[in-house]
Image: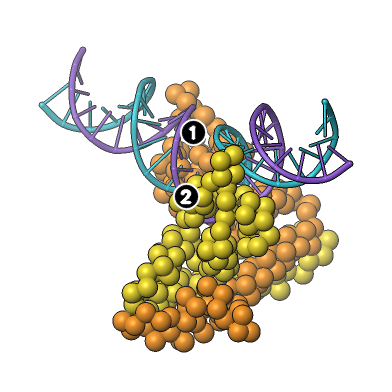
Chain colours: A orange, B yellow, C cyan, D purple
Amino acid sequence: MNIGAAEQASGLPAKTIRYYEDIGLLIPARRDNGYRDYGRTDIHKLAFLKRARGLGFSIEDCRALMSLYEDRNRASADVRTLAHTHLHRIEDKISELQGLRDALSTLVEACHGDARPDCPILDDLSGALAEHA
Amino acid sequence: MNIGAAEQASGLPAKTIRYYEDIGLLIPARRDNGYRDYGRTDIHKLAFLKRARGLGFSIEDCRALMSLYEDRNRASADVRTLAHTHLHRIEDKISELQGLRDALSTLVEACHGDARPDCPILDDLSGALAEHA
DNA sequence: ATAGAGCTTCCCGTCACTGGAAGGTCAAGG
DNA sequence: CCTTGACCTTCCAGTGACGGGAAGCTCTAT
């Protein structure tokens, strides 16, 4: 299977598939002409990577997940720990963004948004409110 | 004021302050010896940038905000539009992360997480559940 | 005079790709 | 047999917003 077909089958761009080879995530066989040759297992792994990346796991997480996936004797606790850590990172990021959202929406609501020059958003950025607080 | 003092006064690392000069955000005066020389207005602008970056605005947003800030005749509507767009981006990102969080937490809860090898998380990643659905 | 802190520029690395150039390979049609 | 065009190869550069560190100049204090 050429890389174009692997692209179709896995849903990952060819560029990404080559990149995954560069960093040693998935190294396919090669034909005599130098073309990459992907087998059924390779396609399965690419789909695995696509799904894991889609869940926000980093490349290094994916590397660990793949090796756990290939280890028939792995403990599910190891996988769970990895996923749990990632879940925490996501929750932290959500909290951070919610803080930003609240601050921003307060400012946006306070700004009348017409043709006049006075603007609570710029006042906040310039530190006017910091002294007021 | 040398860059070290500007660092203290603004709260931005010297590296970042130099970077902002590289990209033309804030270009300070220079002394005869080649040292950067930051004045009161510069410090104010650096603090402005720090606050705007802290609210998650991109560098290009900051560039626009600075120029609006310096334009005594700007319309507050322009600032509000910029902030509103950014607010939307943040809300979209929050939604996306919440989707990831829900999917991940479902998987983490389904995984018993002990020494046994069977693991719903890896099953999901490998597409086993996709065929089930 | 010298030590050490602070300043300068310049280049590389981050993360996970994406775009593009230059060139080799293959299948179909004339 | 030749050409065209699709597909493949490698390599290089850029993304955003810096951070680390090297090599070398300047200032201050002793």
| Chain letter of the residue carrying label 1 | A
Q: Quadrant of residue B112?
A: bottom right
Q: Which residue type does callout 1 highlight?
A: Arg
D11, A29: nearer the viewer: D11
User: For the point 56% across and 45% down, which residue is it?
Assistant: B31
B104, B68: nearer the viewer: B68
> Where is residue B96 drawn, in percent x and y?
52, 70
Sort mark 2 into few (<14), some (14-19) or many (20+) by Cα contacts within 10 Å: few
> Where is residue A22 drawn, in percent x and y?
57, 37
> Where is residue A40 drawn, in percent x and y?
53, 44
Residue B88's disc is none
Residue position for label 1: A36
Q: Quadrant of residue A4?
A: top left
Residue B23's disc is 2
Q: Nearer the viewer, mark 1 or mark 2?
A: 2
| Residue A21 against residue D2 in the figure, above or below | below
B72, A41: nearer the viewer: B72
> Where is residue A130 drawn, in percent x and y?
61, 79
B122, A99: nearer the viewer: A99
What is the C-alpha distance between the residues marked 1 and 2? Answer: 42 Å
User: For the point 63% across and 84% down, which residue is it?
Assistant: A133
Left or right placement of residue A118 versus residue A68 in this view: left
SS assignment at label 1: strand
Sort mark 1 into few (<14), some (14-19) or many (20+) by Cα contacts within 10 Å: some
